[in-house]
Amino acid sequence: MTHLMRVLVATLLCASSTAVAMAGTSYKISCQNEKCGFKGAVDFGGGFKFEQITGYCTQCRKFVYLQWPREEKGKDSPKTKPKPIGLIWDATAGHTRELYVCPHCKKAFFPILSEKELRFCPNCGQESLKLQMRLLYD
């Protein structure tokens, strides 16, 4: 059995168990605009040992992630959640949102809080993204 098959079987077994909670989900994304052709992958949520912020950096033109260890009882975490560099008012949501520094280019990026927010293609700007769940991870 290949490694991918083992991962897939383990994922399906865990997903079918009601007592197991997965921390993260990976999605395959594609733009449905025929003139665009954008394709990629994006992950939401952390894992068993880490937490994560997902965003899209317009400077790097890719999805970016900030990760840090989850706190373990009785242990000091060597790294904590990154501090935002600022707050902006999101008029479409009616509240303030945090801005973070891209780990690659050091420009600001806006976190994407869940897959439900991913509707518009970062390449063409059309409301044409299709998401397909690829993997549950922990």
Image (spheres, helix red, strand yellow):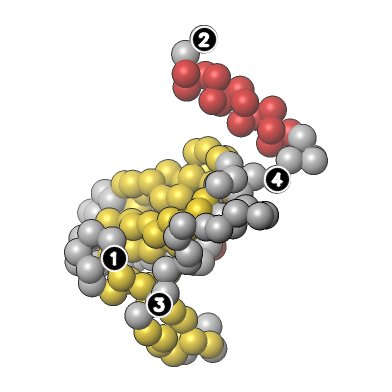
- Is 112 positioned to the left or the right of 24 in the image? left
**Kind of residue at disc 3:** Pro
Q: Position of residue 48 (x, y in %)?
A: 59, 45
Is 134 above or below relative to 113? Answer: above
Report if residue 122 is visible in the image: no
The quadrant of the rendering that contains the C terminus is: top right
Q: CA distance from mark 1 to mark 2?
A: 38 Å
- Mark toward the viewer: 3 or 2: 3
- Is 11 positioned to the left or the right of 37 in the image? right
Q: CA distance from mark 2 to mark 4?
A: 26 Å
Q: CA distance from mark 1 to mark 3?
A: 11 Å
Which residue does the image show at 77% across and 35% down from the upper left? 17
Determine the secondary structure under disc 4.
Answer: loop
Contact, mark 1 vs mark 2 (Cβ under 8 Å):
no
Contact, mark 3 vs mark 2 (Cβ under 8 Å):
no
Badge 4 or badge 1: first in the primary sequence: 4
Q: CA distance from mark 3 to mark 4?
A: 28 Å
Determine the secondary structure under disc 1.
Answer: loop
Which residue does the image show at 52% across and 43% down from the upper left? 133
- Mark toward the viewer: 3 or 4: 3
Badge 1 or badge 3: first in the primary sequence: 3
Q: Which residue is mark 1?
A: 102
Q: Position of residue 110 (x, y in %)?
A: 38, 73
Badge 2 or badge 4: first in the primary sequence: 2
Contact, mark 1 vs mark 3 (Cβ under 8 Å):
no
Which residue does the image show at 54% across and 88% down from the upper left? 94
Sort mark 3 into few (<14), some (14-19) or many (20+) by Cα contacts within 10 Å.
some
* Residue 21: image tag: 4
Q: Which residue is mark 2?
A: 1
Between residue 19 and residue 126, name the one nearer to us.
Answer: 19
